[in-house]
């Protein structure tokens, strides 16, 4: 189901909200930008907001603050691998976002792909390779086998992580060794995936009191053809179309697929599902994001605005629902 209008709560109750932003992952700067933008939007709506950079005293500080709601905007392992979210649940303080076990499933791209595949959805064939396996079986032999088994072009990326860090599209065998090294810079396991030619899209899924619902689809067209980290966060390096330039039937299938995968993985409140739509109109699942970016160039804010809603009103509704639902 695609969202035409975000549900806005009829009765406003100001909340004391602590936003977690920063951390020590490769995506620290993005997290800080997301946190500040969410804080500004919620403050404008009348909420009291504190931005907290997680550290050694995080749990003690949260217990002392006792906010009405915790809103993590942490990207990378420190926020999205499920460990911190499981700890937050032990505090008894409501928090926005998926619970730890569900986040752990989505964080591991290979695991998420397998669950999605078993549920009958399309996802590109892939092989996950740890650094130990890659080394012990002989890098040259493994690379030759990958090209033979999967074919070219293919995509190499860290099996955990976001923001397109360490992602390479490999078009020739000579490009594969460096792509593996780049992926291993960000994770101990690399995912080598078949390349699907098509339209790159992403769907934000939100829960604001009426079940999980898809926001308008965002179509991603990088200027240089690759949606890299720089293309994500530097204005002008990517063209976006919201709603995506897809036929109505294809758009409906993409939105339904995103909502189904959000539910399948057990995600909560807010997620983003990335897909490729091929020439036949089939959506291919790539990955699910537990805490998608909320910066000034991120995709979820674009989808919210395309739904004719303000960021402040939508974030306020999400926060109110997340607190009430726990």
Image: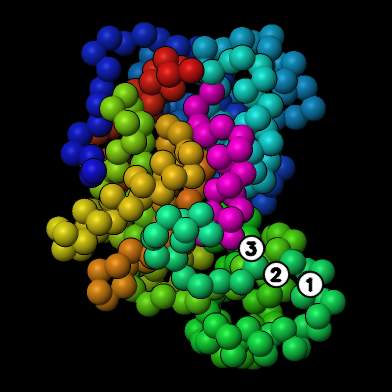
Q: Earlier in the sequence, mark 2 or mark 3?
A: 2
Do we see residue 33 in this rendering? no
What is the quadrant of the N terminus in the image?
Answer: top left
Q: Which residue is mark 2?
A: 129
- Mark 3 and 1 residues: CB-CB less than 8 Å, in contact? no
What secondary structure predominates along the stretch shown in magenta? Answer: helix
Q: Is residue 32 above or below residue 169?
A: above
Q: State the image coordinates of residue 40 (x, y, percent, origin top left).
A: 44, 27
Q: Earlier in the sequence, mark 3 or mark 1?
A: 1
Tag 2 secondary structure: strand
Q: Residues within 10 Å of mark 1 (few under 14, many from 20)?
A: few
Residue at position x 39%, y 60% in the image:
121
- Closest to the camera, between mark 3 and mark 1, is 1
Do we see residue 46 in this rendering? yes
Residue at position x 34%, y 36% in the image:
212
Q: Which of the pair 54/127 is nearer the observer?
A: 127
Q: State the image coordinates of residue 234 (x, y, percent, origin top left).
A: 47, 57
Q: Which residue is mark 3?
A: 158
Q: State the image coordinates of residue 88 (x, y, percent, origin top left).
A: 64, 24
In the orientation shown, which residue stands out farthest toward the left?
248
Magenta region: which residues?
95-113
Q: Please identify the quarter of the rendering in which residue 182 is found.
A: bottom right
In the orientation shown, which residue stands out farthest toward the right?
136
- Mark 2 and 1 residues: CB-CB less than 8 Å, in contact? yes
Tag 1 secondary structure: helix
Per the model, the C-alpha gap separating discs 3 and 1 is 15 Å
- Residue 133 circle label: 1
């Amino acid at each position: 189901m695609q969202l035409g209008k975000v549900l806005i709560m009829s009765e406003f109750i100001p909340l004391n909200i602590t936003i977690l932003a920063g951390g020590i992952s490769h995506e620290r700067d993005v997290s800080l930008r997301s946190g500040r933008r969410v804080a500004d939007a919620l403050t404008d709506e009348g909420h009291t907001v504190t931005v907290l950079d997680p550290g050694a005293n995080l749990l003690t500080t949260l217990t002392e603050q006792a906010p009405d709601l915790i809103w993590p905007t942490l990207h990378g392992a420190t926020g999205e691998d499920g460990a911190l979210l499981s700890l937050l649940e032990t505090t008894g303080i409501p928090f926005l976002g998926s619970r730890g076990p569900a986040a752990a499933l989505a964080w591991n791209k290979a695991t998420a792909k397998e669950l999605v595949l078993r549920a009958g959805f399309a996802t590109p064939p892939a092989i996950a390779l740890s650094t130990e396996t890659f080394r012990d079986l002989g890098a040259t032999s493994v690379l030759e086998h990958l090209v033979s088994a999967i074919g070219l072009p293919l995509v190499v990326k860290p099996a955990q992580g976001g923001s397109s860090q360490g992602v390479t599209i490999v078009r020739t065998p000579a490009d594969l060794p460096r792509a593996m090294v780049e992926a291993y810079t960000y994770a101990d396991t690399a995912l080598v995936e078949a390349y699907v030619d098509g339209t790159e899209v992403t769907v934000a899924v939100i829960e604001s009191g009426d079940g999980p619902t898809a926001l308008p689809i965002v179509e991603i067209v990088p200027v240089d053809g690759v949606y890299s980290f720089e293309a994500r966060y530097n204005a002008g390096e990517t063209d976006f179309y919201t709603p995506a330039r897809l036929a109505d039937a294809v758009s409906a299938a993409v939105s339904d697929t995103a909502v189904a995968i959000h539910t399948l993985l057990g995600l909560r409140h807010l997620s983003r599902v990335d897909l490729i739509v091929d020439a036949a109109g089939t959506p291919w699942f790539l990955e699910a994001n537990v805490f998608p970016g909320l910066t000034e160039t991120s995709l979820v804010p674009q989808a919210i605005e395309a739904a004719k809603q303000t960021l402040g009103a939508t974030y306020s509704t999400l926060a109110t629902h997340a607190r009430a639902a726990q």
